[in-house]
Amino acid sequence: MRNRSLLILTTAVTAGALTLTACGSRDDKGGAGNGDSGNVTVTIGLDAPLTGELSALGLGIKNSADLAVKTANKKEYVKGVTFKLESLDDQAQPSSGQQNATKLVADKTVLGVVGPLNSGVAESMQKVFDDAKLAQISPANTNPSLSQGTKWASGDKKRGYKSYFRTATTDAIQGPFAAQYVVNEAKKTKAFIIDDKKTYGAGLAGTFKGEFEKLGGKVVGTQHIDPETKDFSAVATEVKSSGADVVYYGGEYPAAGPLAKQIKEAGAKVTVVGGDAIFSPEYVKLAGAAAAEGDFATSVGAPIEQLPSAKEFLANYKAENYKETFEAYGGYSYDSTWAIIEAVKKVVDGNGGKLPDGARAKVVEALQGVSFEGVTGKVSFDEFGDTTNKQLTVYKVEGGAFKPVKSGTFGG
């Protein structure tokens, strides 16, 4: 295969001479190739909502991936390779995500992609990446069907895309974990279940419902909402008249906050519970501290501030002075990015210190066997590309902020 090396002329001022530096090369097999000298640039793509209502989560994902790239370059972690981050905004829209996936595939220096945030967006991207043998690792997708197929609930699990991985555990665990806490710890027995009809929200609500009823809880009402309207007065009235003592919402914080506020204002004496997509300070802001007090959210992993493995990440993130916080998925974004870096290292080390032709497919293969101690704990993937870390945490709003109250795994 013939490589077309990209050479950049630079002037060495101190030496007074003109030098040629191999800054990167491209091959015709879909992957960055290595020049005869100097560093090769490997791009890690990133897709997340960087603008819009979910941008708080998306920017935390972006900043954390940026920190991983900077750390790898500073440490010269992969000899002869300089990493670069290319971040694209999907605005939480599947159509934008698919366009971004196509754009990233077209850039042959991209050897892995971090993201997206939303499961619905991921659905639109998976085939594009898989056809190009380009690795994708989401720090936030939780819908089980993305990795285990649409029949996963019946036990017929089939991995549809070998290039898809994730560092967040799935709703097959998160929904039931929440139900166990609601029934066994919070002692709630009558649930009104609401979802936003999206891939993530509807799936999560469904797994909660199944376990809640199995534990003896009674579902006194169900409803679907359009998260764009922000007028939930009708469903709020329905909740109040249902006699529910808990509302489970499958959806994201931009709608969850106003929904909780309107339900409480309607006079319903309920606790609102949701998944990782409402675990954000933004939920409390939108609901109002008074209305949100006592509400719960589950989220993936253990509280990052309490993990010894996260100390360096927390210190480095602070030192970089990012304008936005890392939010719920920062640690998982860092670990997703580092997993790609580890895979690239395995491919380079196995090819005499150079990137081979067709590096993308080799990175996907290497990712399956990646295993390291990350920010969020042990990072490795099972036969479906799902994380082997099944840890979850329940957070309760106390004094206007989410605070961890229970960590564990489903059934534990």
Image (cartoon, grey):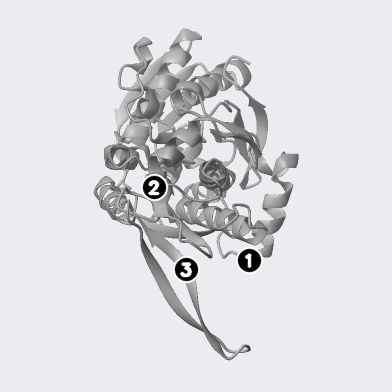
The vertical placement of 343 against 158, above or below, is below
Residue 239: image x %, image y %? 38, 29
> Splitting the image into 4 quarters, where does residue 218 fall?
top left
Residue 27: image x %, image y %? 34, 54
- Indicate which disc residue 99 carries: none
Residue 62: image x %, image y %? 49, 55
Q: Is residue 136 left or right of residue 280?
A: left
The reply to whether callout 3 and callout 2 are in contact (CB within 8 Å) is: no
> Splitting the image into 4 quarters, where does residue 2 fall?
bottom left
- Disc 1 packing (10 Å; few <14; some 14–19; many ≥20): few
Q: Could you say which is closer to the camera, residue 144 or residue 207?
A: 144
Residue 66 seen in render = yes
User: Mark 1 or 2 closer to N-term?
Assistant: 1
The vertical placement of 218 against 301, above or below, is above
Q: Amino acid at mark 2?
A: Asp
Local secondary structure at mark 1: loop
The reply to whether callout 1 and callout 2 are in contact (CB within 8 Å) is: no
The vertical placement of 409 against 20, above or below, is above
- Disc 3 packing (10 Å; few <14; some 14–19; many ≥20): some
Cα separation, mark 1 vs mark 3, equals: 32 Å
Cα separation, mark 1 vs mark 2, equals: 38 Å
Q: What residue lies at 69% left-to-right and 52% top-to-bottom?
A: 314
Residue labelled with disc 1: 321
Q: Amino acid at mark 3?
A: Ala
Q: What residue lies at 51% left-to-right and 16% top-to-bottom?
A: 189
Residue 318: image x %, image y %? 67, 60
The C terminus, quarter of image: top right
Residue labelled with disc 2: 357
User: Mark 1 or 3 closer to N-term?
Assistant: 3
The reply to whether callout 1 and callout 3 are in contact (CB within 8 Å) is: no
Q: What residue lies at 44% left-to-right and 63% top-to-bottom?
A: 24
Residue labelled with disc 3: 22
